[in-house]
Amino acid sequence: MRRAGLLLALAIVLLFAPAALAEPRVNTFTLANGLQVVVIEDHRVPVVTHMVWYRVGAAEDPWGTSGIAHFLEHLMFKSTGKLKSGELSRTITRLGGRDNATTTHDTTSYYQRVAKEH
């Protein structure tokens, strides 16, 4: 019985291994405004993740001052001409998704993840 279980497990691994090891399809292009776009298709999970990375972070804070890059990261969650403060995050949460941002030494990034039907 144990041998049959091991054979079944091996068969399952061999069945799904090619999909797990396949190289992802990557497409890159640049928009007219200079924004570089990278699209990486990954169909293993039925979600869509949108990420925006800025090549600016804490290293750009003026000498003797810290926290400005992180402060600017938080400003992106405030209101705009079309959205109230926190409205984007509330919408994503209502759809069962997640969003967040981070600031490192040399980047500031934002992401939103929702089920693909949304």
Image (cartoon, rainbow, N blue to C red):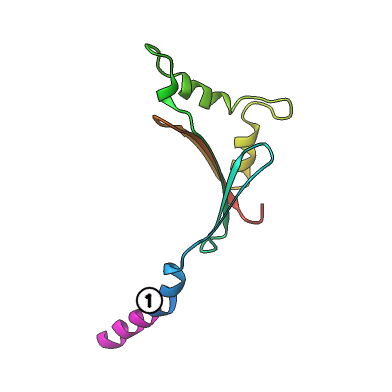
Image quarter of residue 12? bottom left
Amino acid residing under circle 1 = Val
Residue at image location 51% in from the left, 64% down from the top: 44
- Against 94, residue 5 (above or below) is below
The residue most toward the left is 2
Residue 90 or 46: which is nearer the viewer? 46
Residue 55 drawn at (x, y percent): 49, 33
Residue 91 drawn at (x, y percent): 65, 39
**Image quadrant for the N terminus?**
bottom left
> Element type at marker 1?
helix
Q: Is residue 6 magenta?
A: yes
Q: In the rendered structure, which segment of residues is drawn in magenta? A: 2-13
Q: Report the number of discs.
A: 1
Query: Is 46 on the left or on the right of 61, as rendered?
Result: right
The 10 Å Cα crowd at callout 1, few under 14, some 14 to 19, many 20 or more, is: few
Residue for badge 1:
13
- Against 84, residue 23 (above or below) is below
Residue at image location 47% in from the left, 71% down from the top: 19
Q: Does the magenta stretch include residue 30?
A: no
Query: Is 10 on the left or on the right of 68, as rendered?
Result: left
Residue at image location 40% in from the left, 13% down from the top: 65
Residue 51 or 113: which is nearer the viewer? 51
Tell me which secondary structure the magenta stretch mostly adopts: helix
Query: Is 36 on the left or on the right of 3, as rendered?
Result: right
